[in-house]
Image (cartoon, helix red, strand yellow):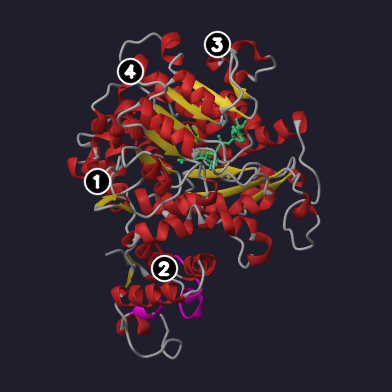
């Protein structure tokens, strides 16, 4: 138990209003005397377990998930230890509330449900002052930043400053899933305007009332921000989150070797999906090198997965040009082929020489893929005909409908299993309940990035790595796939249960840290026991003891 000396203490009502120190009704009698809390609390002392019970009862009694989200946000604002205790002990129930799909709904309503500010807001108006304003941030030991400009929130598009719910949610997952201390986390909204007319016309919108800035002005703000946070928090890990794809690829290329930075939508998604494919192959008995993947959607997520898949094949001795030919894309303009013209930089490696095909079903029938991966943000595009065609071509087709939130999934779990006579190996981005078909029960896997980014971040932070490399993400994918048990596979699930996420993250962190030490990416000396070092760092939601 953490013990706090009197000099650090807040007392009286002040401590009750400090979410990091507040214990609510769990202050002991001795603490109530010592902290001058007598009269400020009801007399009965409750244990953290009893407090958790009360919170769970309240959450479950709420009529909607958005109400549950609001309750949890309020709890985080008043008692962070209890918030993390509840989230960690009930991760399968809480993750869909604090992250996708509920966080999507929360972001869409953000200007209306806004109560207490959380995180750090940087806007175009702050140009030239960011370094100075960062002094206002209370946590001087910040080790990780999740930053968005709100342009592509989940599959919901431009939500401007309302996208702040995403960095907040992701950092809550860092703490819950891998034990990054809450005070080491900084959610950031980079407000460069929005092109969302509904928001611009809403008097309650909290962001800048202007359309998105692009080009030099945008780049200068990002540059100032990256430089300022590295001055304030040297070596801080920066996660780019939900940027529109024109900026996401560009910023990743610009900064990935310069500072400690990655893009979860590209690299985290790549690792989690490739882990799912490796897991699926443990069911089908197929080889990674024999897979042909047809993607629906050629954005950050699709290209990120293809790049990670190619890296995995290259690791197995397959030349990159050959590996890329195993990845095919259908986007809004149909099959991505070489002579389509005007192909953006990030799609070019996957624009193969092939006759053009206009629609997805024809592409399935012509290319005969082993896997279809949906990352289009468009629901319903894995039609009955497309899934049935996959089941004709393959004994065990891989069907991953990864678009978020749930309402955007390319098909549902029930559709995938039904249309393939129970032969599809299915995973989704947002959770689906198990599906009963006849007397068989299928447990869909959730290709949730939360399996990857918390572990990668933990490994980077604990090892003090200066950069985040592609090798780290591939190692994370292998580590995750290796943690799927035979029992999981028997039920059709290609990811371990979320309930094991802390263990999953710690093992991923170990692989990431090993790479940092082996490749000389850190000034820190390699500890004798990397795992012990990781466990020593990890935060646990245990109340401090005041005496
Ligand atoms: P993005 O905007 O970068 O890319 C979307 C792509 O879909 C673009 O290439 C676009 O051309 C294509 N597209 C749009 N409509 C289409 C249509 N009707 N037919 C074919 N293609 C179409 O977005 P992104 O970051 O790549 O994310 C895409 C989706 O993937 C989102 O819903 C996101 O939530 C989801 N995602 C899931 C995971 C996960 O499951 N772990 C991770 C990241 C992203």
Q: CA distance from mark 1 to mark 3?
A: 38 Å
Q: Where residue 238 sits in the image (x, y, percent)?
A: 52, 38
Q: Position of residue 320 (x, y in %)?
A: 43, 11
Q: Earlier in the sequence, mark 3 or mark 4?
A: 4
Image location (x, y in percent) of residue 264: 49, 37
> In the rendering, which numbered label is found on residue 7?
2
Residue occupying the point 78% across, 50% down: 197
Q: Is residue 323 above or below residue 307?
A: above
Element class at badge 4: helix
Mark found first going from the N terminus, 2 or 4: 2
Ligand 1 located in image quadrant: top right
Looking at the picture, how far across and down is residue 267, in whole percent? 47, 31
Residue 20, image quadrant: bottom left
Q: Is residue 251 left or right of residue 18?
A: right
Disc 2 to disc 4, C-alpha distance: 64 Å
Residue pointed to by mark 1:
491
Q: Which residues are magenta?
A: 11-27
> At numbered mark 3, what does the secondary structure look like: helix, strand or loop?
loop
Mark 3 or 2: in front is 3
- Considering the numbered disc 2 on the image, is that residue within a helix, a strand or a loop? helix
Q: Quadrant of residue 389?
A: top left
Residue picked out by circle 4: 290
**As rendered, which of 231 and 101 lies closer to the eye?**
101
The residue under the point 75% across, 63% down is 204
Label 3 to label 2: alpha-carbon separation: 72 Å
Query: How many residues crowd around disc 4 within 10 Å: few (fewer than 14), some, or many (20 or more)?
Result: few
Q: CA distance from mark 4 to mark 1?
A: 24 Å
**Residue 515 higher or lower than 190, as above or below:** above
Crowd tier of the residue under label 3, counting other residues whose Cα lies within 10 Å: few below 14, some 14–19, many 20 or above: few
In-front residue for pair 246/44: 246
- Of badges 2 and 1, the one in the foreground is 1
């Amino acid at each position: 138990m953490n013990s706090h000396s009197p000099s650090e203490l807040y007392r009286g009502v002040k401590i009750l209003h400090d979410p990091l120190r507040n214990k609510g009704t769990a202050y002991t009698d001795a603490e109530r005397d010592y902290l001058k809390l007598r009269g400020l609390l009801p007399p009965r002392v409750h244990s953290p377990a009893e407090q958790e019970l009360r919170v769970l009862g309240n959450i479950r009694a709420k009529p909607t998930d958005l109400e549950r989200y609001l309750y949890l946000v309020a709890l985080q604002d008043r008692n962070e230890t209890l918030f993390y205790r509840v989230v960690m002990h009930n991760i399968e129930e809480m993750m869909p509330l604090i992250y996708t799909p509920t966080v999507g709904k929360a972001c869409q309503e953000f200007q209306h449900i806004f109560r207490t500010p959380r995180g750090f807001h940087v806007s175009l108006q702050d140009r030239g002052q960011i370094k100075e304003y960062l002094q206002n941030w209370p946590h001087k030991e910040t080790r990780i930043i999740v930053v968005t400009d709100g342009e592509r929130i989940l599959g919901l598009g431009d939500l401007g400053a309302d996208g702040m719910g995403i960095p907040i949610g992701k950092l809550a997952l860092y703490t819950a899933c891998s034990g990054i201390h809450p005070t080491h986390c900084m959610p950031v909204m980079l407000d460069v305007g929005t092109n969302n007319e509904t928001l611009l016309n809403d008097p309650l919108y909290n962001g800048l009332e202007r359309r998105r800035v692009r080009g030099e002005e945008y780049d200068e703000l990002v540059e100032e921000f990256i430089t300022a946070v590295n001055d304030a928090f040297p070596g801080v890990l920066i996660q780019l989150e939900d940027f529109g794809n024109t900026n996401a690829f560009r910023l990743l290329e610009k900064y990935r070797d310069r500072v400690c930075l990655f893009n979860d939508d590209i690299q985290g998604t790549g690792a989690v999906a490739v882990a799912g494919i490796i897991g699926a192959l443990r069911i089908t008995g197929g080889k990674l090198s024999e897979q042909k993947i047809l993607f629906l959607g050629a954005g950050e997520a699709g290209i990120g997965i293809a790049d990670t898949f190619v890296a995995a094949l290259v690791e197995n001795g397959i030349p990159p040009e050959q590996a890329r030919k195993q990845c095919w894309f259908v986007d809004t303009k149909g099959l991505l082929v070489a002579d389509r013209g005007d192909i953006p930089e990030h799609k070019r490696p996957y624009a193969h020489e092939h006759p053009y095909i206009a629609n997805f079903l024809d592409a399935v029938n012509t290319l005969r893929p082993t896997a279809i991966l949906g990352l289009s943000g468009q629901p319903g595009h894995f039609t009955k005909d497309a899934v049935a065609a996959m089941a004709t071509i393959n004994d065990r087709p891989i069907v991953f409908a990864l678009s978020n939130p749930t309402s955007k999934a390319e098909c549902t779990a029930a559709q995938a299993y039904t249309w393939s006579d129970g032969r599809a190996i299915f995973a989704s981005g947002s959770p689906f309940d198990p599906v009963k078909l006849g007397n068989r029960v299928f447990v869909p896997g959730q290709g949730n990035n939360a399996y990857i980014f918390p572990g990668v971040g933990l490994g980077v932070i604990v090892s003090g790595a200066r950069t985040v490399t592609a090798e780290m993400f591939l190692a994370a994918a292998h580590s995750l796939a290796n943690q799927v048990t035979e029992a999981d596979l028997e039920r059709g699930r290609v990811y371990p249960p979320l309930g094991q996420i802390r263990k999953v993250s710690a093992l991923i962190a170990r692989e990431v840290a090993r790479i940092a030490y082996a490749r000389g990416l850190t000034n820190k000396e390699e500890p004798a026991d990397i795992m012990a070092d990781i466990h020593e760092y990890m935060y646990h939601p245990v109340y401090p003891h005041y005496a």
